[in-house]
Image (cartoon, rainbow, N blue to C red):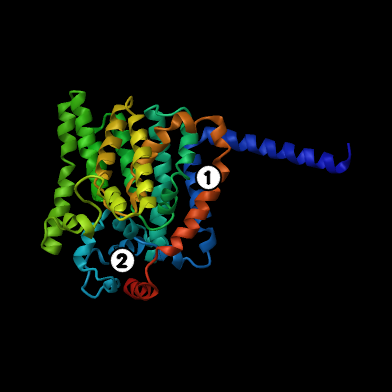
Amino acid sequence: MDPPRSLALRAVASCRRWFLVLLELARRWPRATAALAMLASTLLVWGPFWNRLDVLYRHWDGPHYVYLARTLYAVPDDHPFVLYNLTPAYYATHLPGYPLLIRALVPLALGAYLPAMLLATLLSSMAGAALFHEVLVRFELVRSPLWTAVLFAVLPPRWVVCHSVGASEPLLLCFVFAAFLAYRSERPWAVMLFSAAAAITRMMGVLLVPVFVVSYLLERRFRHASIVLAALLATLGLLLWHLWLYGDFLAYFTRNLRQSGHMAYPPLLGFSSYVAAGDFHSAELCFGLYALYGLGTLALLRHRVVFLYTLAFFTFALFVFHFDLSRMFLPLAPFALLVGFDGLLSRRACRWLLPLLVYMDCVYAWGLIPHNTVVPVAYQSLLRALQ
């Protein structure tokens, strides 16, 4: 055998041995592997921006959240984003869960709020990946929990952006997965606490309350259902706080109705509006998203509590009136997409698509992040406010 060919064969054998070693380590520590997959996905997205981190810092809605972490909602009329015609009452739409986490991590970021924002997103997304793997195992939802947890780091592409910038979705999903694990462990008080935490992170988190209440009622565990109902006190407290801050008990909903926000009646108004305006490309995208998540929800019928969760959030999505519809679907994605379509995604042939998915995620994220940022003037004003 000629030396070049012999050297190539030894290299292939060495790579195969290392691959098998890594595969065995992944099987021994699946939760750590899921978290590391999330870390790797985030680092890939960050790659082109290492020398210009301000692009990551400026991506919406990160600047809003980091400003609230600094001011704790004591927002003056001349706040850094006043050029966007935003009154202090606008911040009723940004709930305190994620800003409080940023604030708590500022000491770890050596007193810097913007790095603390990215750290908050990174830690919550990695923790969410580990918790998601545990949910998959405890509820026996998929054929390969490790593979599905790895896919969670790269699907859907809108999620890849959200777990790499300032966003509250990773923290919300942490509380969602923790609530499911508490439900499985027969700990209704923990279910109540995690549901309450989800409700003050994103308003849609309050949907966890009817999900678990109905599930407990169907099991005739009335005491457990009454305990979970107490999570509504968190939302009530939030609304009372808005009354004190802004003089409007329904400030969140006032801001989020019809053209002024994210919700509208009748259902599917966004879809019909695109059709009426002749924007058939956007209408077809809406059609595809609702069809995909709807089918994924129906596929979960045999897993009652998970089905109730996806049904509640899918019903909420029917009333979403916002151009960023794919982001509004993110709370459903781990279950409706990754679990609902497990029969397809768990096939061995699908695993060869992972490099393609990673490549497309990177192209998508690298293109989207710089095109959705706060203008430089407002960013400089923000930097002065953070000092």
Q: How crowded is mark 2: few (under 14 residues within 10 Å), some or many (20 or more)?
A: many
Q: Residues within 10 Å of mark 1 (few under 14, many from 20)?
A: some
Residue at image point 51% right, 40% down = 33
Nearer the viewer's eye, disc 1 or disc 2? 1
Location of residue 277 in the rendering, given as x and y in whole percent from the top left corner = 30, 56
| 248 in relation to 198, above or below | below
| 144 in relation to 259, above or below | above
Give how far apart the Cα atoms at labels 1 and 2 are.
34 Å
Location of residue 230 in the rendering, given as x and y in whole percent from the top left corner = 15, 40
The answer to whether any part of residue 220 appears in the image is yes
| 100 in relation to 355, above or below | below
Query: Horizontally, is 46 left or right of 14 in the view?
Result: left
In the image shown, does 180 or 342 lie closer to the viewer?
342
Location of residue 107 in the rendering, given as x and y in whole percent from the top left corner = 37, 62
Q: Quadrant of residue 7?
A: top right
In the image shown, does 153 or 233 lie closer to the viewer?
153
The answer to whether any part of residue 110 appears in the image is no
According to the image, label 1 marks what residue?
357
Q: Mark 2: which amino acid?
A: Tyr
Query: Horizontally, is 42 left or right of 8 in the view?
Result: left
Q: Say which quadrant the C terminus sits in.
A: bottom left
| 379 in relation to 29, above or below | below
Residue at image point 56% right, 45% down = 356
Location of residue 310 in the rendering, given as x and y in whole percent from the top left corner = 30, 36
In the image shown, does 87 or 129 lie closer to the viewer?
87
According to the image, label 2 marks what residue?
67
Residue at image point 34% right, 73% down = 378
Q: In which quarter of the image is residue 83?
A: bottom left
Label 2: which secondary element: helix
Asked if the residue at tag 2 contacts the one at tag 1, i.e. Cβ–Cβ closer than 8 Å, the answer is no
Which is nearer the N-term, disc 1 or disc 2? 2
Q: Mark 1: which amino acid?
A: Leu
